[in-house]
Amino acid sequence: MKPTLFALLAAGLFSTSALAQVSVTDPWVRATVPAAKSAGAFMQLKSATAVRLVGVSTPVAGRAEIHEMAMENNTMRMRAVDGIDLPAGTPVNLASGGYHLMFFDLKRQLKEGETVPVTLVVQDAAKKRSSVTVEAQVKPLTYVAPAMQGHGHGQHQGH
């Protein structure tokens, strides 16, 4: 029993130290109307070392994905992507009009003023994964984050 407990504690400590390298600033989710089945989530990510955002989850949705808004044949289209590179020391904005998170099959209405947990999964160059959970504030349907307006793609590659 003791070796197993020690292994679990050691694994937890190792994961925590890897996570300390990724910081999340201003996480928020757009409020929804009562019948809505999807919502967008936005934030700024910064990593001390080069990693890749490869997954997202939240208990308020049946499914969560990493998405990109991009122009295709003069039409703005949204699509899921398998991940977003987070270059070392470079802030990456997840914002309206660029990369962002989408929550589908919402289990309930998301109301302004509440918070929802969002778990991000990052992967390093050695393919080691770690996750961090943040509390994202639910903002009004009309909210636009002033610091991130128009800066969805930043200085990074998503594919």
Image (tube, rainbow, N blue to C red):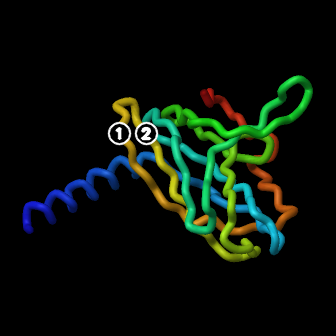
- Residue 97 higher or lower than 112, as above or below: above
Classify mark 1: helix, strand or loop: loop
Mark 1–mark 2 CB contact (< 8 Å): yes
Sequence-wise first label, 1 or 2: 2
The answer to which quarter of the image holds residue 113 is bottom right
Classify the position of the N terminus by image quarter.
bottom left
Judged from this view, the residue extending furthest toward the right is 74
Please provide percent x and percent y for residue 71.
83, 29
Q: Which residue is mark 2?
A: 123
Nearer to me, 5 or 23: 5
In the image, taking residue 128 as reference, residue 97 lies left or right, namely right
- Residue 107 higher or lower than 76, as above or below: below
The image's mark for residue 128 is 1
Query: What amino acid is labelled 2 in the image?
Result: Gln
Residue at image point 67% right, 40% down: 80
- Whole-number angstrom distance, CA of label 1 to CA of label 2: 5 Å
Query: What amino acid is labelled 1 in the image?
Result: Lys
The image's mark for residue 98 is none
Residue at image point 81% right, 41% down: 150
Classify the position of the C terminus by image quarter.
top right
Q: Residues within 10 Å of mark 1 (few under 14, many from 20)?
A: few
In the image, taking residue 70 as reference, residue 154 lies left or right, namely left
The answer to which quarter of the image holds residue 90 is top right
